[in-house]
Image: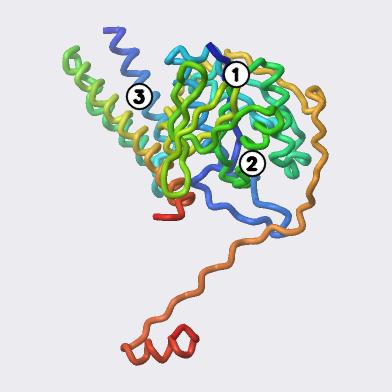
Amino acid sequence: MARVLVGVKRVIDYAVKVRVKPDKTGVVTQGVKHSMNPFDEIAVEEAVKLKEKKLAEEVIAVSVGPAQSQEVIRTALAMGADRGVHVEIPAAEYELLQPIHVSKILAKLALDEKADLVILGKQAIDDDANQTAQMTAAVLDWPQGTFCNKIEKTDAGLTITREIDGGLETIKTKTPAVLSADLRLNTPRYATLPNIMKAKKKPLKKVTAKDLGVDTSPRIEVISVEDPPVRQAGATVADVDALVAKLKEGGHI
Amino acid sequence: MSQLRSKVISLYKHLQYLGREYPGLNGPQKFRKQIHDAFMNHKDEQDPKKIVALLAQGRYLAKEVEALYSLKKYRSVKQRYSYND
């Protein structure tokens, strides 16, 4: 029986068109729909599945971020997590918070809560860092199973099928371990309204980074955030000769 | 009968809740109106058997909508994070 820690991040919803602020210091987040990072949903689903298979006894959802991050913890609780931990970071500080800080926080929590397994999404769809799981494993000095496609419990530990370039890789790890969920690990369930209501009664602990003894002072400075280059309009040509002439002109042939 | 009544109400609430993120222009409003109309069409239904059948139909619809959302999300994330196909 194991205790599972799942990391959930509140990000701008996948369906929203992201806009850059006019002063180029970041993206517009005010009045924009936010939801749980899709890869974290997969991680929560996997943890809840482990619990349903009686391979885990408790699922703890953790989110690091400003006050609104509690929303995604509630969603995780509605999906079936047992309790939540919210590590509150002031909004101003959160903008410069990086995976290294988050991984230290998660590592500390994993030890404090005596977790046997940490499951995270492989990356967040806002900063696309893909570092938190790897760094958490490094800080804890635990084995890591990244980009999980399938997680199976075996006698001594876990057998994990990983998604790698051009195929799948199967590895065995001991527990405790840190895993990161890839897209095809499972299909997350929908958090229904009655479950969201019930989730409000589940315990949610609030701590700060200072309580955990983690220094969250920024290590980077944002110089400028810019839109990706706009794709240039194409043109139609009358016939093959015109096409060849155009290609020659452009230096393609 | 009263048990059925509460089941109908909770199904209605669930469908209205699902409608919040229905895709398309005015998607949520349209979807919620359709659900409302569908329930109103059968408001005088008294036969318990028929009500049970309608409830099953409604639950089937709810499952389909949930599947639609999850597929939509899966597809857009897959499109953004796959490089080889």
Asked if both marks, 2 and 3, belong to the same chain, the answer given is no
Dot label at residue A116: 1
Residue placed at 57% from the left, 52% from the top? A18
Whichever of callouts 1 and 2 sits on the residue coming sooner in the sequence is 1
A123 vs A70: above or below: below
Residue placed at 76% from the left, 53% from the top? A222
Q: Secondary structure at mark 2?
A: loop
Classed neighbour count for the residue bearing mark 3: other residues with Cα under 10 Å, few (<14), some (14–19), many (≥20): many
Q: Is residue A96 visible?
A: yes
The picture places residue B56, in percent across and down from the top left corner, at 24, 21
A192 vs A30: above or below: above
Dot label at residue A9: none
Q: Residues under labels 3 and 1: Cα distance?
A: 41 Å
What colour scheme was applied to this rendering of the protein? rainbow
Q: Which residue is mark 3?
A: B12
Q: Which residue is mark 2?
A: A131
Residue closer to the observer: A36 or B82: B82
**Image side of residue A80 versus residue B37, left or right:** right
